[in-house]
Amino acid sequence: MSIKIENLTHIYMANTPFEKKALNDVNITLNDGEFIALIGHTGSGKSTLIQHINGLLKPDKGRIIIDGEDIFSKGVKLNQVRKKVGLVFQYPEYQLFEETIEKDIEFGPKNLGLNEEEIHKRVKRAMKMVGLDYELYKDKSPFELSGGQKRRVAIAGVVAMEPKTLILDEPTAGLDPKGRDEILFQIKELHEEYKMTVILVSHSMEDVAKVADRVLVMNEGQCILDGSPKEVFKEIDTLEKVGLAAPQVTYLARELNKKGFDIPENIFTVEQIKEAILKTVK
């Protein structure tokens, strides 16, 4: 399912002293099955952009075309769009409300009008994909869980609706390193298992380096970089000018090379630099 963003512009509080152009003539094509990271400092336009893709915000100018259809054209039902494009907000655990985990996850599929057998199958599959054993957790209250487990339940609730595109807004925010890695691993598994397009909004270059196939960098309402992690993270000067940075290990690799090591420049993860260092000392 391709998504085309054409000439997208959004202005908050237009024609007031507080007017702000959050998106400025954005043009991006998101291809079916990609794992895309959307990065940028606070106020760069990331959240505004993803809320247009899901139909929560309407543009002042431009179009969002999903499966060949402009989602804001007359007659298009946005609830049908949201069946195709699932959005997990930041800190989604605050949206849990049912008395058991199973009931919370099945809420979305029930609203799709599915039969009980299909709902049950989807709930079990979604729980498995986020690392929650169905028999062990189905009757527990979501409010008895840890922060990381609550987040998995919230993600499972969207995944159980089986959207073609899944958008996650800062899914690792506030988690400890172990929790961050677990959530990222499970999102990668979801991408591979469901063959869905994933859009991951993040401030963490390290998270992006671990999972993304393609990186979009937002600044002042525009997409200023678009490419593979290797292509984007080599633009360190550009990233730093807009308040971002390459992953920390990239800077470490630079410093090690100054000390006489022979480390490749396209190093973005701890695992990569560990392997590179071991090769140099053998």
Image (cartoon, rainbow, N blue to C red):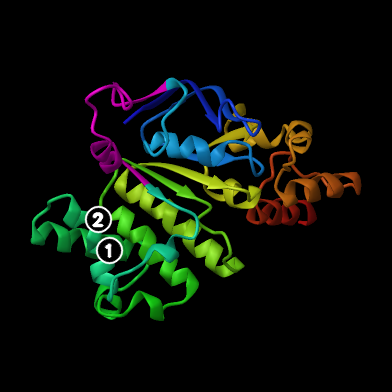
Asked whether, in this view, residue 188 is left or right of residue 210, the answer is: left
| Residue 245 forms part of the magenta stretch | no
Judged from the image, the secondary structure of the residue bearing numbered disc 1 is helix
Residue underneath mark 2: 108
Q: Are marks 2 and 1 in contact (CB under 8 Å)?
A: yes
Tell me the quadrant of the picture where the N terminus can be found: top left
User: Is any atom of residue 132 visible in this view?
Assistant: yes
In front of the other: 69 or 1: 69
Q: From mark 2 to mark 1, how far is it between C-alphas?
A: 7 Å
Q: Can residue 213 be seen? A: no
Residue 95: image tag: none
Q: Residue at x 59, y 52 (%)?
A: 207
Position above or below: 208 against 236: below
Q: Residue furthest front?
A: 16
Find residue 193 and report its horizontal and vertical position in percent: 32, 50
x%, y% of residue 170? 53, 52
Q: Which residues are magenta?
A: 63-86
What SS does tag 2 mark? helix
The residue pinned by badge 1 equals 105
Q: Furthest-right residue in view?
A: 259
**Quadrant of residue 195 within the rendered picture:** top left
| Lateral position of residue 110 relative to residue 261, left or right | left
User: Which quadrant of the view contains residue 243?
Assistant: top right
Residue 125 in the figure: left or right of residue 46: left
